[in-house]
Image (cartoon, grey):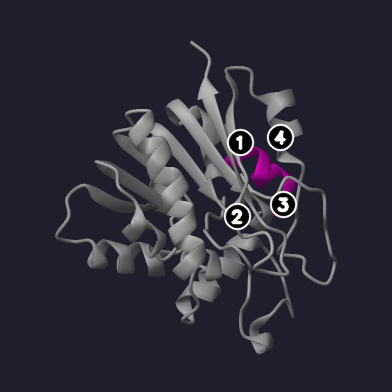
Amino acid sequence: MKKIIKKIPVIGPLAVKWKKKQRMKNFDSSEDYWKERYSTGGNSGEGSYEEFAIHKAEVINDFIEKNGIKSVIEFGSGDGNQLSYFKVDTYTGYEVSPTVVDSCNAKYNEDDSRSFFLTSDYDDRKADLTLSLDVIYCIPEEDMYAEYMKTLFAASSKYVLVFSPDIALYNENLPHLRYRVFTEWVKNNITDFKLHSFVENKNHEATDSPVSDFYFYEKIV
């Protein structure tokens, strides 16, 4: 399993917008796409900035406070901008891109409660809450998607948040994106978690891209 996990791309965009000259001419893998995107100056996307990031943080911070969450692991920490809005005691982010792991560790170097690692360094640690924020539709490879989801749930001791559209959609002209009805996958593959709550994203009218909603899962004791 770890051999596959090391290849899993973890990122955190809402809409995947980039310079046209860099788009999908020769798509090999999502891992290569995100490594190149970050190494050439790309960021985590509009979902990690301004009103999108603020709304996301409001919902997540409210859940953290109401449920006594002390530790968070995010599989897809991106460029670290979204984290600046979170209120949690301990945060660990995992990313496929060495570029953003280094930049995030530099950005938060004076805060010992925030740490960032490459996905290949994941060591089976757990947290109260694990986060997947606009990540799963950026993993078009089916095997990587399945392993990513298994790891996301296995790393949680209490709760999991999947923030994603719950739709089936694929455009061969955008091979780096594949939207799935992930709630069905969870029902069929994850036996020790149940849906805790659903929060609709208030920004459905703010973008032409498919919009993510908040799906909180709770571990069955």
Q: Per the image, is 146 magenta?
A: yes
Q: Give the numbered dot on residue 141.
A: 3
Mark nearer the viewer, 2 or 1: 2
Q: Per the image, is 1 magenta?
A: no
Residue indicated by mark 2? 202
**Residues at marks 4 and 3 touching, judged by CB atoms closer than 8 Å:** no
Q: Earlier in the sequence, mark 4 or mark 3?
A: 3
Q: Earlier in the sequence, mark 2 or mark 3?
A: 3
Name the outermost residue toward the bottom: 21
- Residue 38 in the image: state x and y as whole percent: 48, 73
Mark nearer the viewer, 4 or 1: 1
The residues tagged by marks 4 and 3 sit, at their Cα atoms, a distance apart of 18 Å
> Dominant secondary structure of the magenta stretch?
helix
In the image, the segment drawn in magenta is 140-149
The residues tagged by marks 2 and 1 sit, at their Cα atoms, a distance apart of 13 Å
| Mark 2 element type | loop
Point 18% across, 61% down: residue: 109
- Left or right placement of residue 109 versus residue 120 in this view: left
Residue 163 vertical placement versus 95 (above, below): above
Residue indicated by mark 4? 183
Mark 3: amino acid = Glu
| Mark 3 element type | loop
Q: In terms of depth relative to the viewer, which is nearer, 117 or 12?
A: 12
| Mark 4 element type | helix
Mark 2: amino acid = Lys
**Residues at marks 2 and 3 touching, judged by CB atoms closer than 8 Å:** no
The residues tagged by marks 2 and 3 sit, at their Cα atoms, a distance apart of 29 Å
The residues tagged by marks 4 and 2 sit, at their Cα atoms, a distance apart of 20 Å
- Left or right placement of residue 127 versus residue 148 in this view: left
The residues tagged by marks 1 and 3 sit, at their Cα atoms, a distance apart of 26 Å
